[in-house]
Image: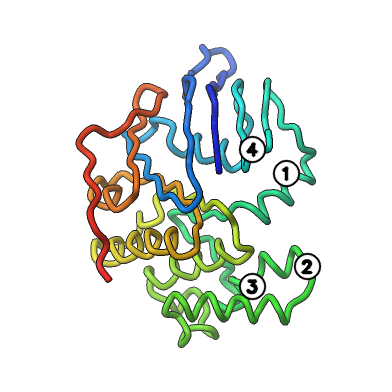
Amino acid sequence: MLEAKNISKSYTIPGKQTIQILRGINLTVGEGEMVTVIGASGSGKTTLLNLLGTLDTPNSGEILFDKELLFRDTQYLLSQKALAKFRNRKIGFVFQFHHLLSDFNALENVAMPEFIATGKLAPAKKRAAELLDSLGLSERFDHLPSELSGGEQQRVAIARALMNNPKLVLADEPSGNLDNNNSRILYELMANLSKERRTSFIIVTHNEEYAALADRCLRMQDGQLHEYPNFRIVPTTS
């Protein structure tokens, strides 16, 4: 479903040397597969997510999505407008900080991506209600983010990421602000969603216990991805 070939990324600080972040990354993710990426802080995990999500531009390599070539030889093959439409329809994003709109309730926050894409509020709210209900938030439709717990806020963020039926969800430390119990619940939820909805997940995390809930775990080290040798799949609870 997603394929990255020989992706490299570097940054040049004015007056200083070039810093190489990613060195020839190769990654393939199948439909409905949940992949976790672990590694030390500053190892390039977030940079990789930004590149795969077309939020940043690699220095070299290729990115294919459903066999469609998106990037080659330092440039995306789609216009900025087309890339924005692609992201809205094909990719969902979940971050450590939920980034919910504080003046809008849970239902409105989740409905926003479809409303922006179509301009039709009623069907967007209907779809949002179905998603929130499926994530156990049927009693929270009218609650503002400030009236929700941390775990509830992140479930709303996941519902919003799923709003347009994306084929891929990219999550950057999604449980970073949650306690252990809510963190595990969140990872189990994403693992179940990947199987039930055939949605692929790539999740950056520093927690090896939660990373082991995925189908596959990779370690980012020295700008490259490696299969995590001690990784074992841990069954999710029902």
Which of the 4 quarters of the picture holds residue 188? bottom left
For marks 4 and 1, the one nearer the N-term is 4
Quadrant of image for the C terminus: bottom left
Which kind of residue does numbered mark 3 sit on? Ala
Q: Residue at x 23, y 32 (%)?
A: 229
Which kind of residue does numbered mark 2 sit on? Thr
Which residue in the protein does label 1 denote? 83
What whole-number distance in Å separates the C-alpha atoms at marks 2 and 4?
A: 26 Å
Helix, strand, or loop for circle 4?
loop
Q: Is residue 10 left or right of residue 226?
A: right
Q: How is the image coloured?
A: rainbow
Which residue in the protein does label 4 denote? 67
**Number of the front mark, 2 or 4:** 4
Which of the 4 quarters of the picture holds residue 41? top left
For marks 2 and 4, the one nearer the N-term is 4
Mark 3 Cα-neighbour bin, 10 Å: few <14, some 14–19, many ≥20: many
What whole-number distance in Å separates the C-alpha atoms at marks 3 and 2?
A: 11 Å
Image height check: is 225 above or below 176?
above
